Image: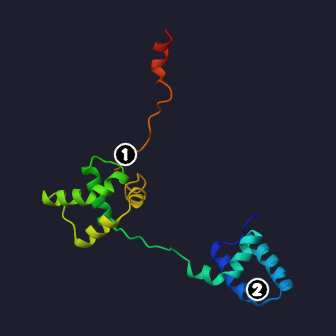
Amino acid sequence: MERSLCFQARREVLHQMAPQYREASPSQKRTLLEAFIATTGYVRKYARWLLNHADEVQQTHGRSQLRRYGPEVQHVLFLAWHAANRICAKRLIPFLPTLVESLERHEHLHISEKCRMQLLSMSAATADTRTLSPITNPHAPARHAENTSSPPANARGAMAS
């Protein structure tokens, strides 16, 4: 089924129909639910859940969590990652307090206290997906595993002889 309404329009329909649905009798609820499904294109079970929980849906509208780490934190993380020979974030994050202290001691890095607190509270998953991925950081090398399941094409002829 095609959905002709955009997300915001479907939410407006939801907030108009939800109070009516809550106060309706079971037979009226069935009619309202059918109309809501026809208008929005939602699956019946999800549509019923939305109509019963419209207040919760309204509270979670928009971005649930704003970006916490600014460009300064991302830049410092990139510098530390580069200094650590571009190790994976899972291994970099536990090593980060020592590394940042060492970089500051040798005057390779100067960061604010706020930046330090954000950097040291970052999880490995956030560091990997938000700041060290090639999409957000064009300087990062592409991470492709080398195929080791078969010999290279130029070696196949040598092995046959």
Give the farthest residue toward the front.
94
Give the farthest residue toward the bottom.
23
CA distance for labels 1 and 2: 54 Å
Disc marking residue 21: 2
**Residue 73 sits in quarter:** bottom left
Query: Does the CB distance between marks 1 and 2 fall below 8 Å?
Result: no
Give the farthest residue toward the top.
161
Residue occupying the point 43% across, 57% down? 129
Residue occupying the point 13% across, 59% down? 105
Amino acid type for the residue under numbered disc 2? Tyr
- Residue 14 percent location from the top left of the image: 69, 81
Residue occupying the point 42% across, 58% down? 125
Give above or below for 61 relative to 128: below
Instruction: Using the image as rendered, state which of residue 156 and residue 10 is in the foreground.
Output: 156
Residue occupying the point 66% across, 72% down? 6
**Residue 135 sits in quarter:** bottom left
Disc with the residue nearer the chain's start (1 vs 2): 2
- Residue 77 percent location from the top left of the image: 30, 59
- Residue 121 percent location from the top left of the image: 33, 67
Query: Which residue in the structure is indicated by mark 1?
Result: 141
Dot 1 surroundings within 10 Å: few (below 14), some, or many (20 or more)? few
Q: Is residue 110 left or right of residue 153?
A: left
